[in-house]
Image (cartoon, rainbow, N blue to C red):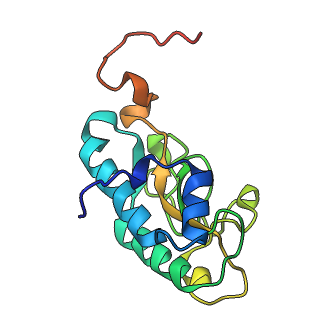
Amino acid sequence: MAKANGLERLTAHEAARRIAAREITSEALVQACLARIAARESEVGAFAFIDPAQALAQARAADGAAPRGPLHGVPVAIKDIIDTSDMPTAYGSPIYEGHRPACDAARLGGSVSGPERLAGGADGSDLVAIGKALRGRHGRRVYAGRARRRPGRVRRP
């Protein structure tokens, strides 16, 4: 895995602008994000599922395709409660562990597509799905800013 190089800190807007201007590739951005995830995931525990090979394949396909939207090639993590046909969706519950929905949730609106659609189907995509995120281990919520702390009850401001 590539070492994080600062690209992982770009905003979505800046990443999209730089990809559109061909200053960076989606593949380089995804590699930087995956490197950052690999470095921090054991401490943060933010991902319920991650498929680096799939994310890199989608990024390469995005790099070789005509732009399909304003966020073309920008990596995203899909919340674990949203159905995606190409990743398991556990809805934050152990009873759904390994569940594979038959289709993507309507709220994705075609903005994130599986590799079979990204690679050449008519239903294009502008985002690259890295994995399913924001479910803490054992059902606990994980807040990246508090990853080093082990608080008891979480109080919201």
> Which residue appears at 28% of the width and 41% of the height?
40
Residue 94 location, x and y as percent? Answer: 44, 42
In this rendering, position of residue 50 left or right of residue 107: left
Question: Which quadrant holds the C terminus?
Answer: top right
How many discs appear?
A: 0
Residue 28 location, x and y as percent? Answer: 39, 68
Q: Residue 73, can we see it?
A: no
Quadrant of residue 123 within the rendered picture = bottom right
Residue 11 vs residue 55, the one in the foreground: 11
Q: Residue 103, can we see it?
A: yes
> Which residue appears at 46% of the width and 79% of the height?
60
Quadrant of residue 110 within the rendered picture = bottom right
> Which residue appears at 58% of the width and 71% of the height?
21
Answer above or below: position of 60 versus 126. below
Residue 104 location, x and y as percent? Answer: 66, 65
Answer above or below: position of 38 versus 116. above
> Which residue appears at 57% of the width and 12% of the height?
156
In this rendering, position of residue 20 left or right of residue 153: right
